[in-house]
Image (spheres, coloured by chain):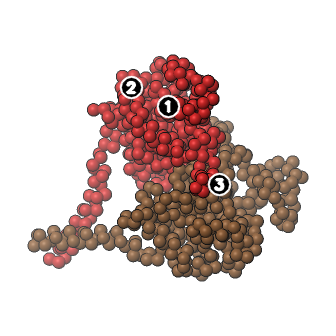
Chain colours: A brown, B red
């Protein structure tokens, strides 16, 4: 009898361990439920299988599993304007109050006028001036507090949702699917690194150290209490866009990604660099071709031209030639937002 | 009988799970065997307990557990000269061969002469010129290959060991002890980020994305095969020393460390910034006071003055005043190197 119990015990323990090990795999038999079955979904699943199956010739050791994601237009809505620009515009009155001499200086004058048409015509240089004036000259902690407060109350003009609710459910599933399979997921954004870090952990499960973005310098100094603090300076350290994204990846990660996701010309070099590595690599571009459920802009495939998130025909053709996979929002995504039924 | 088996089974499973959970803790009842029992060792153990015990008022959630380590002089030997400088000096002949016009230009002329006394007198500006000439203008991949090859064959002049063997065993134990307790360990070095990344994973178990160092820009371009590659440029992005270490931490980690380890004035701001945070914070400085087993230099506590790794009396006094703990190599470390008996 004693032997029987021992044997039975060992068998039951083995069963228990097996159940523990496999239950999570069974529970999520389809890791991408918001995706229609098509080439995009199949490519993601095949890539994960090829790089995580120990018997695969393209197996990637867990430490090297890096996947990078552009944010605006790839993980969340970027229309009618990048949310960070909305934040900066909203901060202009406070900046002008602190420095009244700016009230009659462009582009601050235009922003203060509230004239939406004039504001839509602001150039990139104008926006840079606004960004520099609204995001710098304050302490890192103060910036964090103010950005957090704004994100809690600000709403997107179309869905009347907080910006952090406007993430694409199918992409959230990709982030989780990759992480479940040992990938470290990074945001690599042209947006401000400090701004995205404020919400990335709560919104995407991506910690601050895995957010690579456009970054300015900070200055170390002391408060009146003698405590050290950092002040944000208008000195550009890293312009994390176009080839700058690859520079940012080298600086902050030091490894070539195995998978990269983008949606515009600003992501071209990141995808090219990712695909140029050995073995199985995944490069994907989100095409906004769903005016009804989100937006439609390109101008690839005859979609309307856009100032924000440009996806020209040349990028579309390059994707076709180089094996980068274009995700059609309209055809590949069953559901776009979590707040929708 | 059946009930007995079931009850017994449950009890045994609980026992098994308890054993699995606690066995690693029992196996290493002393996580710091190369440390003598003293205030330094006690401070490390107390800090880990205070920040990882769920019932502690200073408990830190795992995601926020960040510990930063200076490298030269803190994790490994920095005398008679930083190993990266030795690498650069060794590379000068190859650089001069490629650019013969440098042979008669200082400081390259002095290095080519092989005159050790003259080389010891090279200024910081001279060394910067050598670093810029030897570490830039080549691709990131070529640099990686060359640095790897050098590290495999180069030997330290005193112990005749590869540089990567000259790490301090007590500090390796601290790295492991912190990681076992959920801490992410980072190197934050004044040395070159790309150089340290070549060996940090194998030497310290620290992956490239957790190495923050002095960093230059890279340029994205294409080879004759059309493949993209990165070239190292002589353009300084981050001078990761003194206050620059805090800037580097903000840029690359985005969180304030809970523990920081250094050994010289270059680490002052990192320790100050770490200690200025809330809750339990640990700041430690390695004092090289063991001429017999390693080196003795300061000039704190009457030790001989040093050009490399300065630890003046003012830093020693500041440590005493601010609760930073000074590690005496002589008194706190039972054993210094793993290769020693």
Both on one chain, marks 2 and 3?
A: no
What residue is drawn where x is 59% and y is 78%?
Answer: A333
Residue A14's place in the image compared with A230, above or below, is: below
Q: Position of residue A181 (x, y in %)?
A: 44, 65
Residue A5's place in the image compared with B22, above or below, is: below
Both on one chain, marks 1 and 2?
A: yes
Name the one closer to the observer, A20 or A303: A303
C-alpha gap between disc 1 and disc 2: 17 Å
Q: Residues within 10 Å of mark 1 (few under 14, many from 20)?
A: some
The reply to whether discs 1 and 2 touch (Cβ–Cβ < 8 Å) is no
Q: Which residue is mark 1?
A: B90
Q: Which residue is mark 3?
A: A243
Q: Tell me: B213 left or right of B183.
A: right
Which callout, 1 or 2, points to the residue nearer the camera? 1
Both on one chain, marks 1 and 3?
A: no
Which element is circle 1 on?
helix
Q: Position of residue A117 (x, y in %)?
A: 85, 67
Determine the chain carrying the residue at label 3. A
Q: Quadrant of the C terminus of chain A?
A: bottom right
Q: Residues within 10 Å of mark 3 (few under 14, many from 20)?
A: many
Residue B314's place in the image compared with B273, above or below, is: above
C-alpha gap between disc 2 and disc 3: 44 Å
Image quarter of residue B287: top left
What residue is drawn where x is 70% and y is 66%?
Answer: A309
Name the one closer to the observer, B240 or B16: B240
Q: Position of residue A291 (x, y in %)?
A: 71, 78
Mark 1 or mark 2, which has the lower sequence index? 1
Determine the chain carrying the residue at label 2. B
Name the one closer to the observer, B253 or B32: B253
């Amino acid at each position: 009898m004693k032997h029987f119990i021992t044997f039975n015990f060992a068998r039951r323990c083995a069963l228990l361990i097996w159940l523990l090990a496999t239950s999570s795999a069974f529970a999520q038999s389809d890791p991408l439920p918001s995706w229609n079955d098509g080439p995009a979904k199949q490519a993601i699943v095949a890539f994960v299988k090829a790089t995580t199956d120990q018997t695969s010739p393209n197996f990637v050791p867990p430490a090297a599993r890096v996947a990078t994601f552009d944010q605006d237009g790839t993980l969340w809505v970027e229309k009618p304007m990048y949310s960070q620009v909305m934040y900066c515009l909203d901060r202009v009155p406070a900046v002008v109050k602190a420095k009244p001499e700016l009230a009659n200086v462009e582009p601050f004058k235009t922003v203060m006028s509230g004239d939406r048409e004039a504001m839509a015509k602001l150039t990139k240089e104008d926006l840079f001036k606004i960004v520099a004036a609204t995001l710098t000259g304050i302490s890192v902690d103060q910036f964090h507090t103010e950005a957090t407060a704004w994100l809690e109350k600000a709403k997107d003009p179309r869905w009347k949702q907080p910006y952090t609710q406007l993430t694409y459910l199918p992409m959230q599933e990709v982030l989780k699917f990759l992480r479940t399979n040992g990938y470290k997921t990074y945001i690599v954004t042209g947006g401000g690194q400090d701004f995205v870090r404020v919400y990335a952990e709560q919104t995407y499960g991506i910690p601050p150290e895995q957010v690579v973005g456009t970054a300015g310098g900070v200055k170390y100094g002391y408060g009146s209490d003698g405590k050290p603090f950092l002040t944000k300076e208008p000195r550009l350290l890293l312009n994390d866009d176009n080839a700058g994204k690859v520079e940012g990846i080298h600086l902050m990660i030091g490894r070539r990604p195995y998978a990269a996701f983008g949606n515009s010309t600003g992501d071209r070099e990141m995808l090219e660099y990712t695909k140029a590595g050995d073995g199985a690599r995944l490069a994907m571009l989100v095409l906004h071709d769903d005016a009804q459920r989100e937006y439609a802009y390109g101008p690839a495939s005859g979609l309307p031209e856009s100032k924000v998130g440009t996806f020209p025909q040349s990028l579309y053709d390059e994707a076709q030639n180089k094996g980068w996979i274009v995700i059609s929002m309209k055809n590949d995504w069953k559901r776009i937002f979590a707040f929708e039924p």
